[in-house]
Amino acid sequence: MSGAAPTTPSTSGTEPRGPRPKPFFTPKKIIIYTTLFFFSLYFLFPLYVMVVTSLKSMPEIRFGNIFALPAAPNFDAWVKAWTSACTGLTCNGLSPGFWNSVRITIPSTIVSIFIAAVNGYALVNWRFKGSEIFFSILIFGSFIPYQVMLYPLVIITREMGIFGSLQGVILIHTIFGMPILTLLFRNYFASLPQELFKAARVDGAGFWRIFFEIMLPMSLPIFVVALILQVTGIWNDFLFGVVFAGTQNLPMTVQLNNIVNSAQGTPEYNVNMAATVLTGLVPLIIYFVSGKLFVRGVAAGAVKG
């Protein structure tokens, strides 16, 4: 046994290497999060006012603070907005307008997305003579203001016998959604590997087989992007609905305008706020459900051009 004292191990070789981790609250992050927080408040505060106002009674709204929480929350205004609020000459609430909007939105969205997907696929993978000119004309049409086209479109739909009907407003929404949707699908299909298309061609696959069996299964994110854009645009539309739908087929946004701008009786702000929230619920739900796929679609090439 040795009588020498034990030596202290050196710690110089055990120290962690590499750059030190940065603190979470850096000046750059503080500025970014503060800016995002205030912008979030800017957009969410009107929604907060609408919701709390819709849950109050009219005496509480008249004599209380607009920003205060309701003392005794109730859904009477929501029930009245849906079932018995007056929208012009009738007092059936927003429910007829909701179903009219559903009947307009579903076929307009499905048809316009399908045609735009085929257009984008053909413009990328099956180029024909003059395809670039056709695409340029299509995109140019999207920059013409809708108001300029209203009178010619009224004449055209009248001659077709569909003015003042659901078919008329469905056709208008389908056509006006075509340019931006074609641009989205064209850019997305251009970002896919061309080797897939060429290999399918070598194996003897044709136009529709490649489209349905190869392109469509790879295109879920861009379809979600197109779905959100079309549903939001068509559901929130007021102009085409009030001009082309006819008095018996008014969509929800037009009936909301009739409730808010009613000249009869005392304004019921709680009913107006409840009707406004009800009208915006469908786009909000779609955004919350498919938000991740929307971001994936945008990141995958939807906005490249």
Image (tube, rainbow, N blue to C red):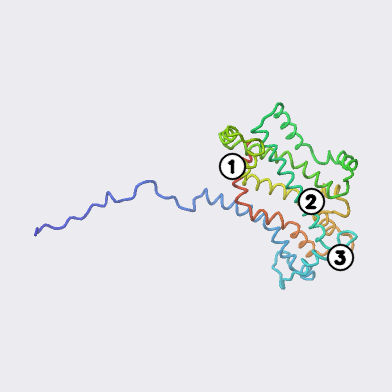
Q: Nearest the camera: 302 or 66?
A: 302
The N terminus: image quadrant: bottom left
Figure check: 236 above or below 204: below
Q: Quadrant of the C terminus?
A: top right
Tag nearer the camera, 1 or 2: 2
Element assignment for label 2: helix
Name the residue that disc number 3 marks: 266
Q: Label 3 vs label 1: CA separation? A: 52 Å
Q: Residue at x 72, y 28 (%)?
A: 133
Label 1, on which residue?
300
Residue type at the position of mark 3: Thr
Residue 92 relative to residue 35: left or right: right
Q: SS of the residue at dot 1?
A: helix
184, above or below 85, in the image: above
Q: Which residue has dot 2 on it? A: 104
Image point (52%, 48%), residue name: 28
Nearer to the camera, 37 or 285: 285
The residue at 59%/35% (across/down) is 200
**Image spot of residue 263 (x, y percent):** 89, 60
Count the labels in the image. 3
